[in-house]
Image (tube, rainbow, N blue to C red):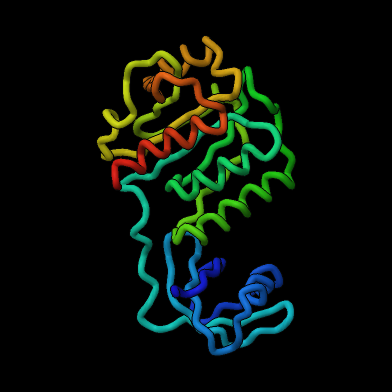
Amino acid sequence: MGLHRVQVPGLAAELVLGPQATRHLHVLRLRPGDRVQVFDGQGGQAEATVETLEEARAVLALVSGTGAQDTRETPQPVTLAVALLKGDKLADVIRAATELGAARIQLLTTRHADAREIGAQKLVRLRRIAGEAARQSLRAHVPEVLDPLPLTELGWEGTLAFAHPGSAARLGDLLIWDAPLTVLSGPEGGLAEAEVAHLLARGAHAVTLGPRILRAETAPLALLGAVAATGV
């Protein structure tokens, strides 16, 4: 059985954990002397020993000679741009997107979006879900979950591909990995014609997700799945 994984603010010889991270150690039933794998959410990871474990504070000591960078990331960063969704749909998308390798997640407001805004507490929860998913999927990189912005203000580097019914192009044909990639998925009502025209005019690519119409919470994962299926 592999070591339990714990996210820490950064890698240092001595790591002092606050109440939330310490609570996680108690849930795992760890004791002083046990070893864990720590990761900083930015790609660094190492093994550490639990030195002190109190009710709301813990001290870990890094094992020398560790700290190797994560090798589970794509050749270039992949950003998921996704329209706001109602209820827990967005949480499910964040969790699975992290497992599928997204480096960052940009929330969008669009003309037909199910939701127009997102509360601060929900944003905190989504970021926590991303961290938990990274820990469980053995990633050392936790994707950023960025505050929503209007689709018309979205910027990107490299290639942007967006799911659009009736398109002939396939995402796999665009993957050349010489620059970052952004994949974009709209709301339940789809992107407005003006939004599609705006993206195309800026050099984005409309791609197909097959002959079936997918739900708004399924489409972003189909895009990321197509990337993951390349084996990178």
Q: Residue at x 36, y 64 (%)?
A: 69
The spot of residue 201 in percent (x, y) is 41, 14
Q: How many numbered badges does the structure rendering display?
A: 0
Decide which of 196, 169 is in the foreground and name it: 169
Q: Residue at x 61, y 74 (%)?
A: 28
Res. 200 visible in picture: yes
The spot of residue 55 in percent (x, y) is 74, 80
Looking at the image, residue 60 lies above or below residue 132: below
Looking at the image, residue 55 lies above or below residue 206: below
Looking at the image, residue 227 lies above or below residue 137: above
Q: Quadrant of residue 177?
A: top left
Q: Is residue 134 left or right of residue 206?
A: right
The spot of residue 110 in percent (x, y) is 60, 22
Q: Quadrant of residue 111?
A: top right
Q: Residue at x 56, y 40 (%)?
A: 93
Q: Is residue 161 left or right of residue 10?
A: left
Where is the N terminus found, in terms of image quarters? Answer: bottom left
Q: Is residue 154 left or right of residue 203?
A: right
The spot of residue 104 in percent (x, y) is 49, 44
Q: Residue at x 38, y 16 (%)?
A: 167
Decide which of 64, 185 is in the foreground and name it: 185
Decide which of 102, 136 is in the foreground and name it: 136
Res. 140 visible in picture: no
Decide which of 156, 183 is in the foreground and name it: 183
